[in-house]
Amino acid sequence: MRDMADFQIPLLALVITMTSTLALAGQSPSSQPTLRQIAGPRLLIGGAIMAADLEDPKVAQLIATELSTVTGGNEFKPDFLQREKGTFTFERADKIIAFAQQHDIKVVGHTLCWHQQTPAWMFQKPDKSPLSREEALDNLKTHIETVMKHFKGKVIGWDVVNEGIADDPKQYIRDTPARRAIGDDIIIQAFKLAHAADPDVELYYNDYNIDAPYKRDRALRLVRDLKAAGVRLDAVGIQGHWLLNSPPASEVDDAITAFAKEGVKVMITEMDVDVLPRKAAGADISATEKAGFDPYKNGIPAGVLQAQGKRYGELFKVFMKHRSDITRITLWGIDDGRSWLNNFPVRGRTNYPMLWDRELHPKPAYEAVRKELLSASTEG
Ligand code: XIL
């Protein structure tokens, strides 16, 4: 269990800072402690951001005050960093780094090896047949080395492999161009290359639905396989693209217990709570749906926002119960208007998955999260 003092020191420091600020200003409190202030340094609270978001001063201000970590929503992915072989484009990712450094925010690198948003040349010949193992490993090595060296000391950790486990329960490693070229040890190879490129940075395995029983056992097997191969693995990232009514919070609870038992930290890395109907749970970005209801185009009933708040609350209660094993909770976005769920799995809907609304006002979900963080910080 986490020591009581770990949570109480930041809270105490916060109360002192706020009291002295208020005394100077001689005014009644107009603002309350932010999420990052309540959570303190031991539990990072984050959001996925785009470099373009930072051009809006109100969004930048919200990120800087509320969050202690950010993940580039797209900017650190292979097709952003090396769309053409040998040409690295770091400008947009570097904007995120510069902003984070200015505001004492930690950056997570997402991601080095993924079957989406990755240029075909990395693992395939022009006719789409796999490259040789040697060529593919060489491309992966150059990418990982160049990228990790560029960001050395600037990111705290990397999602080395994203979504490497198959959705089909009968399969283990996902069938991807990288696996077809390199083989079943693709995930182990990626972790070895990453550790060699930067031995100081944290390395994570990140995936969706690994909280769900159908995929969890294979994720646990992967943790054991990575350990048996002697590679560094600091944490497992549960993406957390969840719906209003599924999965049950108890499944998330059980999954965190199971991963922690394997001796790794757990991070919630891409959380959102979708309020719109859709066919598939999870976050397979190729699982697009042609049409779907868009019931809240002109506004969302207060009752649905309350239900969403309750849902965020029950999930954060689970995270707080496991706070000695959970080191980071990152939301996949900032406000409803910018969320990727306005376009996934159906394009062009009006979704409301985040803690802040389209005007950047905190929603009931924000209050629910705040309440759970606060009660954990005073409970010890
Ligand atoms: C999403 C981005 O948010 C979108 O802007 C992009 O069009 C598609 O990818 N799981 C992941 C993230 O690991 O990288 C995905 O991000 C969302 C699902």
Image (spheres, helix red, strand yellow):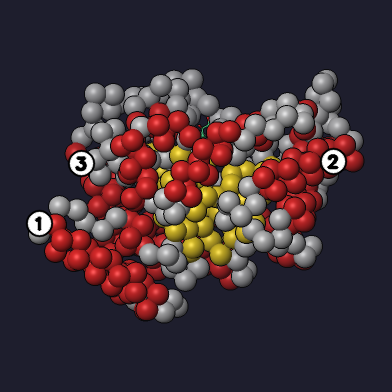
How far apart are labels 2 and 1 at the CA level?
62 Å
Residue at image position (39%, 51%) is 67
Query: For the residue labelled by badge 3, is the local secondary structure a helix, a strand or a loop?
Result: helix
Residue 178 versus residue 21 in the image, above or below: above
User: Which of these two is toward me, 216 or 233?
Assistant: 233
Amino acid identity at mark 3: Gly
Residue for badge 1: 27
Amino acid identity at mark 2: Asp
The answer to whether 115 appears left or right of 74 in the picture is right
Classify mark 3: residues with Cα within 10 Å, few (<14), some (14-19) or many (20+): few
Residue at image position (48%, 64%) is 326
**Along the polypeptide, which appears first: circle 2 or circle 1?**
1
Residue for badge 3: 303
Of the numbered discs in the image, which one, if any, rests on residue 138? 2
Classify mark 2: residues with Cα within 10 Å, few (<14), some (14-19) or many (20+): some
> So how many labels did they put on this image?
3
How far apart are labels 3 and 1 at the CA level?
35 Å
- Residue 124 location (% of width, % of height): 81, 29
Q: Quadrant of residue 123?
A: top right
Q: Are marks 3 and 1 in contact (CB under 8 Å)?
A: no
Query: For the residue labelled by badge 1, is the local secondary structure a helix, a strand or a loop?
Result: loop
Q: Nearer the viewer, mark 2 or mark 3?
A: 2
